[in-house]
Image (cartoon, helix red, strand yellow):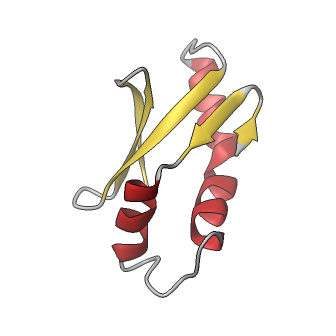
Amino acid sequence: MSRDGYAFVLERPDVDKLKAMSDFEGREEPAVAEDFLRFRAESWADILASAGAEPGEIGVKIDPHQKKAHLKRAERVVITADI
């Protein structure tokens, strides 16, 4: 999912973590990942741009225990957002 030059990538293990969370249980693929990213991409892109992050690929890592999404570039956390 891309927005304003940021390409948000949710890898398979993180899709599985997302599907295991109560808010997303029972939802089918690929809709769960696509919907998750689509509803968040605009605000994440705005936050990243405001923080001065260069556009590019942003990995989305799911932390189901804290209900957080860690947005990473080159294994470095750029921002952490609530799910």
Which residue is rendered at x = 70% and y = 46% of the image? Answer: 1
Name the spot of residue 53 as percent of width and height, x first: 56, 15
| In this rendering, position of residue 66 left or right of residue 77 | left
Name the spot of residue 28 as percent of width and height, x first: 58, 81
Q: Which of the image's four quarters has the C terminus?
A: bottom left
Residue at the extreme front: 12
Name the spot of residue 55 as percent of width and height, x first: 66, 19
Front in this rendered view, residue 79 or 58 = 58
| In this rendering, position of residue 33 left or right of residue 2 | left
Q: Quadrant of residue 43?
A: top right
Front in this rendered view, residue 10 or 36 = 10
Q: Quadrant of residue 65?
A: bottom left
Vertical order, 49 against 40 (above or below):
above
Residue at the extreme right: 4
Total marks placed: 0
Residue at the extreme bottom: 26
Front in this rendered view, residue 75 or 65 = 75
Residue at the extreme left: 65
Which residue is rendered at x = 64% and y = 21% of the image? Answer: 56
Vertical order, 57 against 44 (above or below):
above
Q: Quadrant of residue 48?
A: top right
Vertical order, 8 against 72 (above or below):
below
Name the spot of residue 6 as percent of width and height, x first: 67, 29
Which residue is rendered at x = 48% and y = 88% of the image? Answer: 26
